[in-house]
Amino acid sequence: MTVVQEQVDIVPVRAKGRRRSRNGLGARLAWGGAIAAILAFLYLPIAVLVLFSFNSGRLLSWPIQGFTLDWYRKLASNEQLIEAAWNSLYVATCSTALTLIIGVPAALALDRLSFPGKGLFRKLVLLPIALPGIITGISMLTLFRLMGANLSLTTVIIGHATALLAVVVTQVYARLQRLPRSYEEASADLGASGLQTFFFVTLPNIRTAVIGSGLLSFTLSFDEIPVTFFLTGRDNTLPMYIWSTMRRGLTPEINAVGALIVLASAVLVVLSVLLLRDKPGGRA
Amino acid sequence: MSLAEPLPEARLRARRWTAMRRYLVLSPPLLWTVVFMFVPYLTLVVYSVWRAEFPLAVPDFQFGNYVTIFTDPQYRNVFLRTLKIASLVSLCALLLAFPYAYFLVFRVRSPGWRLALYMAVVAPLWVSYLLRAYTWKTILGTNGILNSFLISAGLIDEPLTVLLYNQAAMVLTLTYVFIPFMVMPIYAALEKIPPSLHEASADLGEGHLSTFFKVTLPLAMPGVIAGFTMTFCLSFGDFIAPMLVGGPDGQMIAGVIATQFGAALNWPLGSALALTMLVFILVLISASDRLERVGQGRLA
C-alpha cells in the first residue's frame, strides 16, 4: 500500500520523466538478472571467439592451454587471406561509393519528386531489406549468365550495391522527411542553382544520415556472403575465404581473424555513434 | 513583404533547372533499379520455365519445375521445416527482445544508460554474421568449448553430442544472429507510447499487469509485428547457419536453392524454388504491413 502511495505522490512531480516504476528490491533483482542474462547471451560467444584466438593449443576446447600470439603471426604470413582481405576492402569501398551515388538521389526522388511508377520504384528499391540475400544473388547470377558476363569482383560489387541500396535509401529518406522544404526553396529564391542548393543546403543537412548509412553499407558489404557466394568468380572475399576454411576444419586461426574483425567493428560502431550524435539545436 | 519577393531571374533560373534536375536526380537510380533489380527478377522467371538437361538449362516454356516443387514431398518437407525453424527463431527472439526493450524504455531512467544498453544489442550487427555463427559452432561441438567446460567442471562425464548439428542448434544460432532486428522495432514502438497513458491507466485504478495488457502490449503490437516479420524473413532465407550448425535434418529452403545453383546444377528448378520463396515472402510482408497499419491506427 505504501508503495502505491509513493507513486501517486511522485508522478505529478516528475512531469517529464517516465513514471517511477515499482522499485521493490525483488523486482529490481529479477530485472537485473534477466537483462544480465540477455547481455551474457549476446556477448559471451564473442568473448569466447576472441579468447580462443590466444589459445596455444590447436583444439578449441576448455580450458585454454596457454597464451600465444602465434595464430596472429600465422595470419600475417597467410597470403591467400591477405589477398582476400584486400579484395573485400576493394569491394566494400566500391560498392559503398556506388550505393551512395545511387541511393542518395533515389531517396531525394522518393521524397521530393512525383513521377509515374514511383510506387513500384519504391517497392523495388526497398525490397532487398526483407528479401533474403540469396534471391538477390541468384537473380543477378541469372542476368549475368544470360548477358554472357564473366563473374568477377566487379559483378560482386554490382550485387552488393544493389542489395545495400535499401539501407542507404531508408536512412537518407527518413532524414529528408524531417528536413523542411523551405530551406531549398529559400536557396533557389536566393539564386542558387539546383546543384548549388544540393551541395550547400541539402547535403550538409543530411550529412549524418549519409555518413551513417555509408559506414553501415561498408560493414555489411565487408561481411556479405549470400550475394557474394553466387556472384564471385575466382577471387575470394574475406568472408568467403573464412567460410571455405571453416568447412575444412576449425582452427584458432579463424578466431584470430574473427578477433581482428570484432576489433575493427567495435571501432566502426564507436565512430558511427560519435559521428552521428545529433546535437539538439545544432546543425546536423 | 516586398523584401521576401524573389528576384524574377532567380525564379526563372530555378524553374529552368527543375526539368534538368529531375532528370539528373531520377535517371541513375531508376536505371539501376530497372537493370539490376527488375530485369534480374524477370530472368529468374525466364529460367524457372526452362528445362534442365544436366548440366545445362535449355530454353523452354513449361511449368514442370513448379509441378515438382508442389508435388514432390521432399520439397514440401523442406518448406515446412524452414517454416518451423523460422517461426521458432522469431518466437525465441521475441521472448528475449520484448523484455529487453521494455526494460530500456520503462525501467532505465538515465538516457545515457538507455543509449548504451540499446547500442549493446545493436552493435553485434556490425560484427561479421559469419563469425557470430561460427563461434556457436566452436562452442557447441562434441569436443567444443561448452562440453569441455562442463566436463572440467565435473558436471558431465561424457561430451554431449546433442548440442550441435541439429535443429535446436540452428534455432539458437539464428536467434543469436537476428535478435537485433527484433529489438529495434519493438524499442521504437514502446518509446512512442506517451507516459501519460500509463499514468492515466494507473489513475483509473488499473494495476500494472492490466495496464501492460490493455495499454502497453496493444500499442507495442506494430513493433512486434515488424520485428517478427523481419526476423522471420531473414531466418527463412538463411543458408549459412544451417550449413554451419545444422545437421542432416537441417536442410532449409535457401540451402536447397543454393545446391540447385551449385552441385546439382539445376538452375531452372532453383529459379522456380527462389520465385516461390519470393512470392511467399512478399505475401508475408504485405500481410504484416496491413496488420501494422491496423495497429498504428490505435495511437492516432
Image (cartoon, helix red, strand yellow):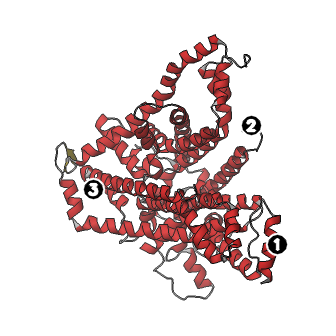
Q: CA distance from mark 2 to mark 1?
A: 40 Å
Instruction: Please name whichever residue, B281 or A186, is drawn nearer the observer in this view of the structure.
Output: A186
Q: CA distance from mark 2 to mark 3?
A: 56 Å
A37 in relation to B155, above or below:
above
- Name the chain under label 1: A
- Name the chain under label 2: A
Instruction: Please name whichever residue, B14 or A264, is drawn nearer the observer in this view of the structure.
Output: B14
Q: For the residues carrying marks 2 and 3, which lies nearer the camera in this image?
A: 2
Dot 2: what SS?
Answer: loop
Residue B264: mark in rendering:
3
Residue B298 picture location, percent across and down: 55, 59
Can I make out residue B165 in this image?
Answer: no
Please name the amino acid that badge 1 sits on. Answer: Asp
Please report whichever mark, 2 or 1, sits nearer to the chain's N-terminal start.
1
A201 in relation to A153, above or below:
above
Please name the amino acid that badge 3 sits on. Answer: Ala
Judge if badges 2 and 3 mark residues of a common chain: no
State the residue position of label 1.
A9
Label 2 close to label 1 by CB (< 8 Å): no
Residue A283: mark in rendering:
2
Determine the residue positioned at 76% across, 79% down.
A4
Determine the residue positioned at 69% across, 17% down.
B5
Instruction: Please name whichever residue, A247 or B100, is drawn nearer the observer in this view of the structure.
Output: B100
Label 1: how many Cα within 10 Å (few below 14, some 14–19, many 20+):
few
Q: For the residues carrying marks 1 and 3, which lies nearer the camera in this image?
A: 1
Can I make out residue B25 in this image?
Answer: yes
Q: CA distance from mark 1 to mark 3?
A: 71 Å
Would residue B117 be found to the left or right of residue A243 on screen?
A: right
Residue B186 picture location, percent across and down: 58, 61
Determine the residue positioned at 62% across, 64% down.
A46
Please name the amino acid that badge 2 sits on. Answer: Arg
